[in-house]
Amino acid sequence: MKSIIKRLFNFLLFADLDKDIYKETMPDIQKANLGAINAVSLISSIIFACVFLLFWYRGELAQGYVYGIFLCFVLPVYVYIKLKAEKNSGIIAVIGVYLMSVLYICGIMIGVVYNTGNCSVTFVAIVLAFSILFVERPWRIQIIGAFFTFWMCALSARYKSPDLALLDTLNSTSFFLASCYICPYIIKGRVGGFYIRLQLEKERDLDGLTQIYQRGAMTARVDSYFAEHKNDRCAMMLVDVDCFKNINDSYGHPTGDKVLKKLARSMFLSATGRGFCGRYGGDEFCVFYYGVQSDDELKSYAGEIISNFKSNSFYSESGEEFYPTVSIGIAVTDSQSRSFKELIKKSDKALYRAKENGKDGFNLETD
């Protein structure tokens, strides 16, 4: 019995969602929500403006002032989103609740105050639309739904006959309770859809062996970063396993694969919070760093990659220990190298010089 209650509690409050999955899918969900908020606010603004102007044209401004008030609440949402394209999750949540609250108030007032002789159904559609358009924790939707159920019942009791007010109360309460059951399924389904798509994108973008970006995804990410950050000083490191062919020939390809995995892990640890890394091809890898302050900082990063790589123990399938090394070529952005193609070409020259200098080290391209 206790487990059933716990399961029901998790379903109603959290839609049985895994927190890690929810967190992972949230960036994509927020983008979709932003588009929905933008569309809803634009359409609502147009409707409110048209109705307000119609009343004004007919000389019945007193009857249409409420639409003018709603227009003043909703239009700024559309303008704000257009001016501020990038939002964090907190702003998205605030805007979504703000906008839908205004629409709730408008819909319920229209459905009750301007329709005193019939039952109101506007509330029902809005309750279901809220959960479909905006993915949030179910308990937040339920709190909002409970508040507006009370709001509708209060308006019906004030403006309608007792029989119609009772019918509105029963209808709105019934549909609110139904939404408490339906909303978690809608949320769970939508989050699940985003998660599946995210996993498919990961499979497409990640190298199967090392689980870091493959070349195409790395190219796209670097070029996208340059497009959004015109003046940021960045750097590219091209990392190559020294004499990797000899490792494969002497110890076998499975052992060579282990070397590549450990090198990828060393680069990933260094790039986390500073940039991103990918497999360029074969035993060559690339690491992109953004927000670089000095050449000494880059030398420190390169030393860190080499140190992390060497801290691993490497054994062949027969148990023989060996000691692979890596060489790194480093290139810093300038006016001519603000693309993946140009920056990788520059770092390749630096890598060639690092190999000439005896391998097992790094070279910073300063030309």
Image: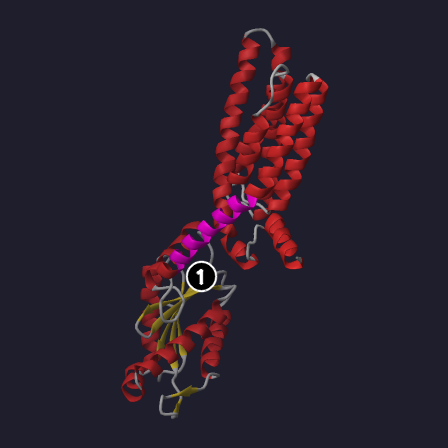
Indicate the quadrant containing the N terminus: top left, top right, bottom left or bottom right.
Answer: bottom right
List x then y, in percent, for residue 131. Answer: 55, 40
Chief SS of the magenta region: helix
Asked which quadrant contains residue 179, the reply is: top right
Describe the element under mark 1 as helix, strand or loop: loop
List x then y, in percent, for residue 25. Answer: 49, 53
Q: Nearer the viewer, residue 108 or 28?
A: 108
Asked which quadrant contains residue 362, the reply is: bottom left
Count every numbered label the image shows and give the total: 1
Q: Is residue 312 magenta?
A: no
Asked which quadrant contains residue 126, the reply is: top right
List x then y, in percent, for residue 265. Answer: 45, 73
Indicate the quadrant containing the C terminus: top left, top right, bottom left or bottom right.
Answer: bottom left
Q: Is residue 243 left or right of residue 49?
A: left
Q: What residue type is disc 1 on?
A: Cys
Q: Is residue 340 left or right of residue 296?
A: left
Residue at horizontal 35%, vertical 62%? 343
Q: Is residue 120 above or below residue 58?
A: below
The residue that disc 1 covers is 234
Which contiguous range is marked in magenta? Answer: 183-202
